Amino acid sequence: MKNFSALLCLLLFALVVAPGVGAVPINRSDFSSSAIDFDFSSSTSSDFNISGGSFSLGVYKTYGTITIDFTMPVSAVGMDVTRTKSQPIEMSLYDSSDIILENYTWNDTRPFFIGLNNVTSEIAYVEIFSNKDDLDIDNLIYQSDIQSSPVPEPATITMVLLGTGILGFTGFKRKFKK
């Protein structure tokens, strides 16, 4: 019985300490029909400010970090990326208090689409970082579909069920000892 209790405590520790599900990348097809597509043929937009590089031949070029600061609430953002080397590309989403909402790293070496979403919080700005690599971004797409989720996250449900199970097991164990 002691071994079972120790195993149960270890399982509880693993569930509490184990990180939750991280950011999941999205594809261009995951955006709604109301999404705004900006192709960088013009260098200005009233919906966002971009810094960390320069416009050239219809793409935004940089070496290092690009910051896209939105002037409106955004729930998802993505773009086409081309790079000269095979360094990882990291995309981070932040809220207006500079708290990171999502983060994901791509290790793909060919031109590809990068995108993340966060439907429960407003994305204030995005940072795209690639160490020692020239990045060209094009076809920025973003949407504003902020939703409040009345359904609890799977981790919350798991913790509630696990806690209830431990309380039930403890009660059963006490009753069994008497």
Image (cartoon, rainbow, N blue to C red):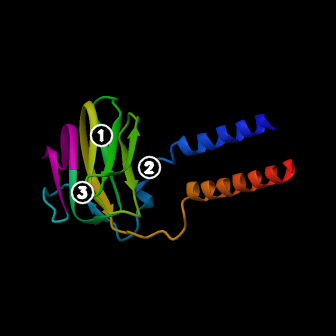
**Is 165 displayed left or right of 120 in the figure?**
right
The amino acid type of the residue labelled 3 equals Asp
Tell me whether the residue at label 1 lies in contact with that at label 3, contact meaning CB atoms closer than 8 angstroms: no
**Residue 7 percent across, percent down from the top left:** 71, 37
Could you tell which of marks 3 and 2 lies nearer the N-terminus?
A: 2
Q: Secondary structure at mark 1?
A: strand
Could you tell which of marks 1 and 3 lies nearer the N-terminus?
A: 3
Majority SS type along the magenta span: strand
Residue behind mark 3 = 39
Residue behind mark 1 = 82
In the rendered view, tell whether residue 88 sits above or below residue 104.
above
**Is 165 displayed left or right of 116 in the figure?**
right
Residue behind mark 2 = 25
Q: CA distance from mark 3 to mark 2?
A: 21 Å
User: Per the image, is 51 magenta?
Assistant: yes
Q: Residue at x 54, y 68 (%)?
A: 151
**Residue 14 percent across, percent down from the top left:** 60, 40
Could you tell which of marks 1 and 2 lies nearer the N-terminus?
A: 2
